[in-house]
Image (cartoon, rainbow, N blue to C red):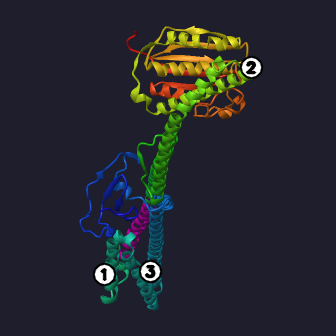
Amino acid sequence: MEAPWSCFRNAARCRHGPTRTLLAWCPRTKSSSFRAAVATVATTRHFDLAPPWLSIAAVTLYPRSFLRLILSGWLLIALPLLLAIAFASVSLARLSARSEAALQQTAEATRLSWELDEDLLLMVRILRQHEALRDPSLLDDYVIARNEWRENGAGFARVPLLASLSGRVNELLVLEEAAYHQLTTDNQGTQALHEALSDINHRTVGIIGEVGKLTEAERMSFRTEAETLQQQLLIAMSLALLIAAVLFWSGRLILAQLLQGVGRAVSALGNNQLEQSIRLTGPDDLRWIGKRLDWLRRRMLALQDERKRILRHISHELKTPLAALREGASQLSEGIAGPLSPRQEKIAGIMQNNVLRLQGLIDGLLKLQQTEHVRERIERVPLRLDEMIEQILATHKLAARDKRLHITGTLAPLTVAGGHEEVTTIIDNLLSNAIKFSPPHGTVRLTLTRDKHSAVLDVKDEGPGVPEADRTMIFEPFYRSPGTKSVAGVGLGLAIAREFALAHRGSLDFLVSDEGAHFRATLPLATDPP
């Protein structure tokens, strides 16, 4: 029982086609036998274009669309920066509250220490006036000043910054209380109170100094805390930027891998690599593109098979009537059916030439069809490439003589490993192509050299060359440059030669030249010469 392609539910995957995988129960199957983590049953090979480090489990983490993938990536990149901004905001708010509290405590400490000293001086002044004037009402003023002094002294305990001094201030309060008690209760003189206030004044100076030190220490502590926070914010922002950069680079790599998968699929189709199915991983729309590309691959395979069938059928059906036409034209030219007039001989010659041209076209189609599986059927034997070139040159001597061409060059004695018929076709097509397109009285240059483990054959002519716009198409079957329409041919020679060269694990390339065309064929050398 199989489920349709559309059965994608979050992390569950129900896939059909060449491979059936079910990682969760599919409600369309109407069967509870399909459970999570069912083993994959592979029925054919896949052209898996996913990044190698992405597993099937990781694929389910992709958003459903490419737009969501991009938005999720940007959100993930922005997340460290947002966290850094939030950390900075919280830290600055905390520092601001700390600064406000420290400022209030410092101001309160300064006020209390100043008023404590001022009230003490007022108490001493009132006490001296009382001793000089013996005015009892001055004691009431002393009580008022005394109460304010004691209230300010008690305020030290309410300020956290001055908590360490509250004990010493309390000692002053107790000392003054005892002296004042003697004045009011025992009706003694003010001498004891004077001595107590003098001692208190001396101690107050030390306390005021300590308050100054505490406020300065608080200010330095706040500055240190601010500098520490500044360093923390700098580190946090640096880490956030680093993480964002890493995430951005990782996202870029993921997108590049996904797009490279599409590129590899398109390249495979362009290079006629149609044997393996195409499967793209990623968001749903990217997988949909993979399905459409695989449909295109299957369509191209079907068209290719149809083309092969048509070529086989046409070639087979044309052989018999073509042979009859060739034989009839030959007999007419030889006068077997009777003597011919000059006009009739000309017509018979035209018929014979076109029959031979059609025969060459059919042979070219058959060879082009054979190139698709030539690598498997090549019987590689050691071949003296320089001797083969000389033999093939001999077959083109008449054509070169008719155009008064000068063929020159140097041939190194090199032995290659390959099929005799295929290597002969490569050399013959290159030489015939150079002779065909060379102008009268032109020069064809052949050079056979060795490059490491390969034999390199360069063929140059002085013909019209290949326009830049046509250089990517000259190796395509049936393609002919618009400037060469006047030269006989069907556009199969270079295509067949290149396929044969590639089948030998070599190459056939067009090189840019100042004059004419320059083709270079590379074939692997044989390990053991004949």
Residue 281 against residue 116 in the figure, above or below:
above
Q: Which residue is mark 1?
A: 178
Instruction: Please tell me whether residue 319 belongs to the stretch shown in magenta.
Output: no
| 240 sits left or right of 463 in the view | left
Identify which residue, 300 or 188, lies in the foreground: 300
**Residue sitting at the far left:** 33
Residue 123, numbered label: 3
Instruction: Please tell me whether residue 212 belongs to the stretch shown in magenta.
Output: yes
| 320 sits left or right of 41 in the view | right
Mark in front: 2 vs 3: 2
Q: Amino acid at mark 2?
A: Ser
Chief SS of the magenta region: helix
Q: Position of residue 228 (x, y in %)?
A: 43, 56
Which quadrant is the N terminus positioned in? Answer: bottom left
Distance (Cα) linking label 2 and label 3: 158 Å
Q: Which residue is mark 2?
A: 341
Which quadrant is the C terminus positioned in? Answer: top left
Q: Position of residue 295 (x, y in %)?
A: 47, 52
Q: Amino acid at mark 3?
A: Met
